[in-house]
Amino acid sequence: MKKIITLFIIIALVISAIPTETVNSKSKLKAYRDKAKRIEINNGFDAVDSADCVDEYWNHKGTVFVERLIGKVIDDNGNGKVLNTAEITEYDYINYSTCKANKGDIIVTYCLYNPESNGEDDIIARWDYIIVHKAK
């Protein structure tokens, strides 16, 4: 009986040590994705979630490619972190200094890439929408 109680105590301690942000981050990201998909950018293009478009970065020449990024403003200077990347940390930075966002806001960004090049940063149009305002 002591072994079972000890085991339950150890499990409880391990679970309580896990940050809730980690436990809930996948469900939060799913909710953000669902909210982002409801936003119309009124240009007739289907957007591809950032996590699903790694190949398009390198091979979009000749096609219209719109990427959907979901990010969080991380400071008062407009620096942000993309939340829906494909586990590639080189692509998790985004800047929100040109939109009226505050630290902690969640933003969906649509990027239209130049169909005449394969440049990974050759964005010809960008739309930012705040989907979650951080409570003050």
Image (cartoon, rainbow, N blue to C red):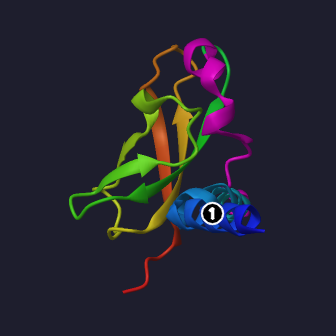
**Percent of width and height locating residue 95:** 33, 48
Quarter of image, res 77: bottom left
**Percent of width and height locating residue 41:** 64, 55
Q: Is residue 49 left or right of residue 80?
A: right
Q: Is residue 100 left or right of residue 134?
A: left
Determine the residue positioned at 43% across, 38% down: 92
Determine the residue positioned at 65% across, 65% down: 6
Amino acid type indicated by mark 1 = Asn
Camera-side residue: 44 or 77?
77
Provide the residue designation for mark 1: 24
Mark 1, other Cα within 10 Å: few <14 / some 14–19 / many ≥20:
few
Q: Which residues are magenta?
A: 37-60
Q: Report the number of discs.
A: 1
Quadrant including the N terminus: bottom right
**Percent of width and height locating residue 31:** 69, 64
Residue extending furthest left? 77
Determine the residue positioned at 33% across, 58% down: 74
